[in-house]
Image: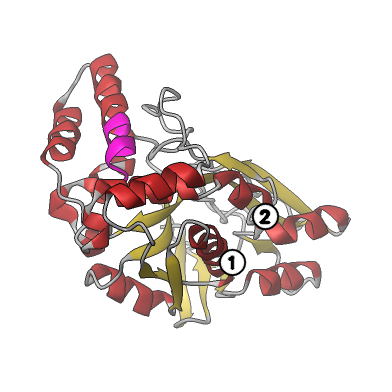
């Protein structure tokens, strides 16, 4: 490739140097150092202070400050990702579709858009991002209806609600979990928030220990299969992506039939049917589609947003 690795310090940084023997178009950058800065506000401060030249992922709460600073520039685009609340369909309470539907009714998704991402995104209506071919607008997000949620919980045998845990990682998702905790409390569900380091979170989810969890999924392939097969096919429980541990014959059939279908119009119809059915059985509560926000120093040249957020850094440079 155009670069070779010259240094790697796990969980801190790695450095790449331009490969002068590269056969293709030579990148402009001579070296690139990528730092790991988990805290969103710390990333933004490092950018504004000139300690870094580019921040790959600017938290929505830091966007306004970057926009107001003439030394830096915020680049934004609609992402191909979805943020969602997942439910473990093998756990006793969440085996019942009425409980899962109740949680969808109990959450005001617009609150997450307004507070967590400060309006930089839209409510997710479906399980596929609106930028992905195959997404349908014929599915409507569950409306905020606590009374309907209570009715469904009573039908499922939980007239007084129940207690459960939600597994999360990071400050942003912890804040989302607090909103979930408060809104579900209104319908009688008491939520205990368990915060994990990223690796420990994945280990717990992959082992199926969880009841509920918060994650996001980005589809850089822009094919609807990339938003369905890994996440909902019964052969992909756990680490492969199906952390709702969903097993459903109809879901499997629709996914495989869509993979095999060569007629694009018919294929898109299968994905529409799949989205309608997932909306009905509710292994998730889709929350929002967010923007990709990248911060750069104002005089940095050569950087362009990639629509799937796999941004290329090889041509980043300064003219001086």
What distance separates the C-alpha of mark 2 from that of mark 1? 9 Å
Q: Is residue 55 above or below residue 81?
A: below
In the depicted view, which residue is nearer to us: 211 or 80? 211
**What percent of the width, then of the height, locates residue 156?**
27, 51
Q: Is residue 75 above or below residue 90?
A: above
Residue wearing tag 2 = 115
Residue 249 falls within the magenta-colored stretch: no
Residue at the spot 27% in from the left edge and 18% down from the top edge: 264
In the depicted view, which residue is nearer to us: 175 or 20? 175
In the depicted view, which residue is nearer to us: 270 or 183? 183
* Mark 1, secondary structure of its residue: helix
Residue wearing tag 1 = 175
Residue at the spot 23% in from the left edge and 59% down from the top edge: 240
Identify the main secondary structure in magenta: helix
- The reply to whether the C-beta atoms of the residues labelled 2 and 1 are less than 8 Å apart is yes
Q: Residue furthest bottom?
A: 9
Give the left or right position of residue 270, taking residue 64 as reference. left
* Mark 2, secondary structure of its residue: helix
Quadrant for the C terminus, please. Answer: bottom right
- Write the start and end of the magenta stretch as one range: 275-282
């Amino acid at each position: 490739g155009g670069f070779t690795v010259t240094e790697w310090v796990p969980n801190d940084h790695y450095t790449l140097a331009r490969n002068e023997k590269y056969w293709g178009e030579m990148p402009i950058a001579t070296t690139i150092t990528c730092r790991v800065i988990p805290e969103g506000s710390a990333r933004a401060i490092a950018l504004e202070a000139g300690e870094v030249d580019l921040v790959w992922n600017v938290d929505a709460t830091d966007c306004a400050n970057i926009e107001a600073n003439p030394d830096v520039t915020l680049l934004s685009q609609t992402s191909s990702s979805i943020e969602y609340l997942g439910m473990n369909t093998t756990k006793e309470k969440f085996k019942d579709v009425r409980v899962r539907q109740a949680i969808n009714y109990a959450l005001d998704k617009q609150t997450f858009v307004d507070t967590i991402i400060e309006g930089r995104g839209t409510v997710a209506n479906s399980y596929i991002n609106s930028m992905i071919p195959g997404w349908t607008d014929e599915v409507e997000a569950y409306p905020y209806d606590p009374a309907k949620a209570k009715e469904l919980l009573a039908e499922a045998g939980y007239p007084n609600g129940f207690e459960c845990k939600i597994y999360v990682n990071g400050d942003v998702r912890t804040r989302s979990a607090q909103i979930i905790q408060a809104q579900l409390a209104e319908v009688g569900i008491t939520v205990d928030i368990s915060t994990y380091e990223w690796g420990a979170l994945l280990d717990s989810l992959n082992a199926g220990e969880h009841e509920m969890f918060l994650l996001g999924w980005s589809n850089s392939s822009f094919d609807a299969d990339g938003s369905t097969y890994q996440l909902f096919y019964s052969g992909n429980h756990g680490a492969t992506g199906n952390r709702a541990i969903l097993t459903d014959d109809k879901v499997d059939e629709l996914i495989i039939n869509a993979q095999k279908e060569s007629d694009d119009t018919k294929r898109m119809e299968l994905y529409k049917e799949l989205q309608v059915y997932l909306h009905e059985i509710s292994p998730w509560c889709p929350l929002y589609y967010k923007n990709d926000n990248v911060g750069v120093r104002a005089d940095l040249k050569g950087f362009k947003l990639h629509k799937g957020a796999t941004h290329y850094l090889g041509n980043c440079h300064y003219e001086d």
